[in-house]
Image (cartoon, coloured by chain):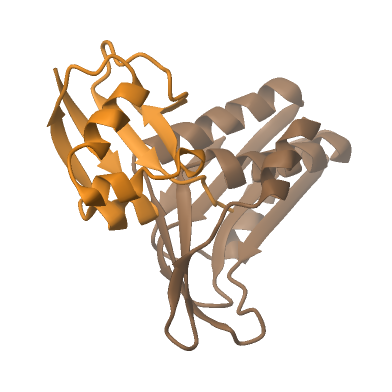
Amino acid sequence: MAVRVQSAAFDYGAECAAFAQGAGDAGAVVTFAGIVRDEGGRLSAMEIEHYPGMTERALAAIEDEARERWHLSDALIIHRFGPLAPGEIIMMVATAARHRGDAFAAAEYLMDYLKSRAPFWKKETTAKGDAGWVDARESDEAALKRW
Amino acid sequence: MKLRVLYFAWIRERIGEPREDVETEADTVSALIAQLRAREERYALAFSDLSAVRVALDQELADMDAPLAGVREVAFFPPMTGG
């Protein structure tokens, strides 16, 4: 189980491979990556701000909750902050379990909660140079109700 | 009591500071916000729509009517947009 919050880019392929290799006798590994969209050329940059200290605590609490709900042999959350360009990987989650149902459900749970309960904020800059904070979506808040 | 108060995202930009120490007798988050709003226009602007403000006490999410007794760090920020 691990949580990493960092500004540096990470190698998604290498992280996935290492996670799967370390998953032991888990029969199922699910991985997900979030990528900066360019919205058809509309966006030129994204800046992610976070709350150092609380971010790590919130992510660890979300991971702990997932372990309570499903039989996971391992879980990993990596989330970047700072300036990012379209196409760059923002974050990833990985879950390992004996059966794929637990691995899929836990990965979705981690994503739903870290979108609305981990202290990150996104600021987008358009190709025209306008910058603005991304509003939270009601659908993201509503997604928590299914758990 | 003295509180460390942190601001993030557009709340930080409107107030113009990422953090400050605030001397207060406020007993709840709401009372602290009322005190800050009365200070200057930039605070009034930052806290003009409380439906768009979230608060954490010592790095745990809390409600606006939460008590401040024993709290050292208060953070104000908009709804989170991770992932």
On screen, residue A93 versus residue B47, left or right, reads right
- Residue A107's x, y, as percent? 72, 43
- Colour assigned to chain B in the rendering is orange
Quarter of the rendering occupied by the C terminus of chain A: top right
Query: Residue at coordinates 48% horizontally, 60% vertically from top-left?
Result: A122
Q: Which chain is painted in brown? A: A
- Residue B41's x, y, as percent? 23, 50
Query: Residue at coordinates 56% horizontally, 45% vertically from top-left?
Result: A77
Quarter of the rendering occupied by the N terminus of chain A: top right
Q: Residue furthest top?
A: B69
On screen, residue A147 versus residue B83, left or right, reads right
Q: Does residue A23 appear anywhere in the picture?
A: no
- Residue B72's x, y, as percent? 23, 22
On screen, residue A137 versus residue A146, left or right, reads left
Disc count in the image?
0
The quarter of the displayed image where residue A123 is located: bottom left
On screen, residue A67 versus residue A76, left or right, reads right
Query: Residue at coordinates 87% horizontally, 37% vertically from top-left?
Result: A101
- Between B54 and A71, the one nearer to me in the picture: B54
- Residue B52's x, y, as percent? 49, 44
Q: Does residue A30 appear anywhere in the picture?
A: yes
